[in-house]
Amino acid sequence: MEFNIKPFHKKQDTLLGINLFFSLLNDSDLRELNETILSISKSGLARTKFVAVYDGKRAAYKIHFVPKLNEKIQVTEIHVRLESISIQRFQNYQKNLEKIRTQKEFKHIQATALLDSNLNLINFFNKNSLSFEKIIENKTGKTEFTNWVKLLFAGKGDAEIHLSAQLTGSTSLKISFSGFNTEKSMICLTIESEDYKDNNSNQVKGLQFNKNILNSIPADIVFWNMDHQYIFLNENAMKNADLRKWIIGKNDFEFFQYRNKPVEMALKRRETFNRVITSGEPAYLEEHFKTSNGDFHHLRILQPITDFEDHIEWVLGYSIDISSIKRIESRLLKMNLAVEEAMDGIAVLNEKSEYVYVNEAHVKMFGYTNPEDFLGNTWHMLYEKEEISRIENNIFPLIAKNGRWAGETKGKSKDGKTLYQEITLTSLPDGGLVCICRDKTEYRENKDRIQTAEIIADNINSIIMITDPNLKIQWVNNAFEHITGYTLNKVIGKHPGFLHGPETDKEVVKAFSKKLKQGNPCSAELLNYAKDGSKYWIQINVTPLYDENNKLKSFISVENDVTELKNAEINTRNALSKEKELNELKSQFVSIASHEIRTPLASIQSSSDLIQMFISSENVPKDKIKKHLEKISGQIFRLSSIMSNLLTIGKINLDKFSLNKNEVDIENFISKIINDFFGINADGRTIRFKATGTKRKSDIDQVLMSQVLTNLIGNALKYSKDKAEPEVLLEYLPENFKISIKDYGIGIPQDQIPYIYDSFFRARNVENIQGTGLGMVIVKKFVEMHKGNIEVNSIENEGTTFTITFPYT
Amino acid sequence: MQKRKILLVEDEITLRDTIEEILDFNDFDVKTASNGEIALAVLKDWKPDLILSDVMMPGISGFDLIRMVQGIEELKQIPFIFLSALVAKHEQKKGLDLGARAFLTKPFKTADLLKLIEKHL
């Protein structure tokens, strides 16, 4: 049975009620146990008691009381353990100790003797510690002692006597005896010293003969009494002689307090001590402490010394300095930890090349999960045939020669992947090998990648540029020099902005720089200038690079020369816009042509309807009908001329015109056209014609030239309504002749002059004036066919002059 | 009975003369204008019962003219009919949106023109 009880603090405290067991005890036993508990509560020392109870049958118990102490050296609770023992054993114990057990102050008993009535020593328990005979030999003492003992035998009961005694080889001592009559024939004596310390040393006197031996043993040897007080220390246990003397009779708590040492160690010692005195078995305690000489580890062994059954007299403590063992152990532990936790793979192989140890890194490096996968296997498991033969034939001889080899090997992982290792192999005295390896696969792959990247960088047509975070160039590839004409040395440290020029889009640069400042990847198309001033388009992609602290490290810029693409794009865009323009012109033409055709058609329809009305009606003069028939004929002519213009353009576009020149009097030719086509005009105006210079004949195609002149003169009239009459001037020049057609009309807007020869083009100020936008196309084409030249001079709202110049032949 | 008055605005002289003659023959009191400016000048002192107008004319176009007429309180009620070579639907819609009663495309039958005039007078 085991349980805990609270420590007792008052004399009245009792075990009764704590556990049913105690109610079985008789009063005397219970009182004694109560006192024991009270004592234990103060001293913190374990105690063992024997009791017999009657519970239907007789039973005996050995009760162990083991106190628990806190760091303030206070007992917090007491562990109680009941050990059932045989009645026989209890009786033996009782027989020998019954009387001693009843002593009030057991702890001060230094010697106990049983005497018969003749003062013959029957038994002397502390025979090693005190020579009883010596006390009795003391003369004064002997008389007094003999008288006192006689009184005891006379039945006077408890009594005490204080005597001076002289111990052999020692100073005189004052000794107290207390005794009582046990049986008629026996007396039990307790001998107690007044000066306990001295008495202790006296007690130890029995050890003195061993003192020299004990001091010469290279171990700490101490003896404690049952109160855990030092009664002996050898010189090794305590070098300082004064301290060694001081400590006698004191316990560890006092000593540790005196030396200002942590109380925990004293508590550990007390715990161990209590274990020893309750179990009767030796106990071990490892202690670690620091001194100016370094760290120390001591293994303390506490050995109970008994002088009869179950009765422990002292406890012997001896200790061994295990510091060096501890140091080795600690070093081994650290080394083991270092090896186990190493980043490098570490393996140990035996003489048969089998793994006997692999650390975690080694296991993982090769894609395994368990060290067991390696143990017992040879290193061949990690290599391909070729590599195995290289290692065995080339490397092992070197290890045999030098004891060590370092280099690179090509292994394979569990799943067959190729791995590269930087490896160190060291031979062991027993024929084994230590292998330390580091995974170089990534390094190898990176190296390959970097080499590949360098080759690519220098051979691709794109510019690759590396800049610092402030965009200062750090490196450029060959393509940069090829495209810009600047060499690497010339541009290091420069901002790439030096490549910009007047046509570089500043808005794009601004937006681009802004994005870069935010550290974002970005791309743009920019026009840059090479060293020779030539322009080139680049498509730039910039990627920012960050270091492991997420700090911007550099920018990598890949720039493609897109000049051709860009030009093509511009051309396409221009072509598209031209196409669009053309389409617009065409639809404009359709609507104009429609208007031009519909208006004469409307006229014809109206005249025709009117004639119908006239016929149905009476009294309508015939000339009215005639007038409208003429009108119809005139409108039909107008329609056919529009049609012929369209046909002409069609032919021009198909290059169907050929030049049929013959000799003509150009002056007459012009006059005839003016008369035939512009003799009488709707608004009554005429064309004024004049010729200057020496008259000459010239070779022209009359059909084409007629078209040129009717168009130009027709325009001059059309666009100068209500203004002065247009003028035509023919000039005979030495090399060529020149015809100017001048009007005082609305003119052509300055910005639209370049477009007047485009098909279907009509200036913005003529949108409400009839026209097809085809006349000038025809004019220009026919002038050119004559190897002539056409010029225009026009001011809006003032008038226009067309000048055509032809060679005579 | 007083003759009903029609203003004809048309820049193309041949067509203008012919339509004028048709209207005259059909007993309308007709005045003509060869462009928008002249038409506005005529309208100053003479309020017609109907206006016939071309669209594409130099200077003030037919569309400009109707906008101006619509802006003049005493003229805005006068029925306005376009005679035009513009055949595009959006142009015709534009004319009607501006307030014209009808949009007659050239060439047109005289009978259709007269019917339209009768309808809107």
Image (cartoon, coloured by chain):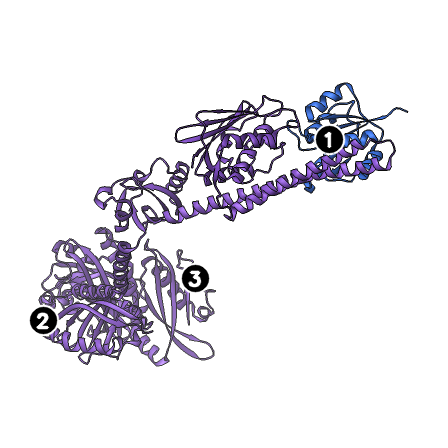
Chain colours: A purple, B blue
Is residue B116 visible in this depiction of the protein?
A: yes
Which secondary structure, mark 3?
Answer: loop
Measure how far apart labels 3 and 2 are at the Cα level. Answer: 81 Å
Furthest residue in direction top, as rendered: B45
Q: Which amino acid, mark 1?
A: Arg
Which secondary structure, mark 1?
Answer: helix
Q: Which mark is residue A402?
A: 2
In depth, the one of A44 and A669 nearer the eye is A669
The quarter of the image holding the N terminus of chain A is bottom left
Measure how far apart labels 2 and 1 are at the Cα level. Answer: 123 Å
Measure how far apart labels 1 and 3 are at the Cα level. Answer: 146 Å
The answer to whether the residues at label 1 and label 3 have Cβ atoms under 8 Å apart is: no
In depth, the one of B29 and A65 nearer the eye is B29
The chain carrying label 3 is: A
Residues tagged by mark 1 and mark 3 found on one chain of the structure: no
**Which residue is at a point 84% across and 34% down the rendered structure image?**
B118
Q: Which residue is mark 3?
A: A14
Residues tagged by mark 3 and mark 2 found on one chain of the structure: yes
Q: Which amino acid, mark 3?
A: Thr
> Residue A781 location, x and y as percent?
49, 40
The answer to whether the residues at label 3 and label 2 have Cβ atoms under 8 Å apart is: no
**Which residue is at a point 43% across and 70% down the rendered structure image?**
A25
Q: Which residue is mark 1?
A: B16
The chain carrying label 1 is: B
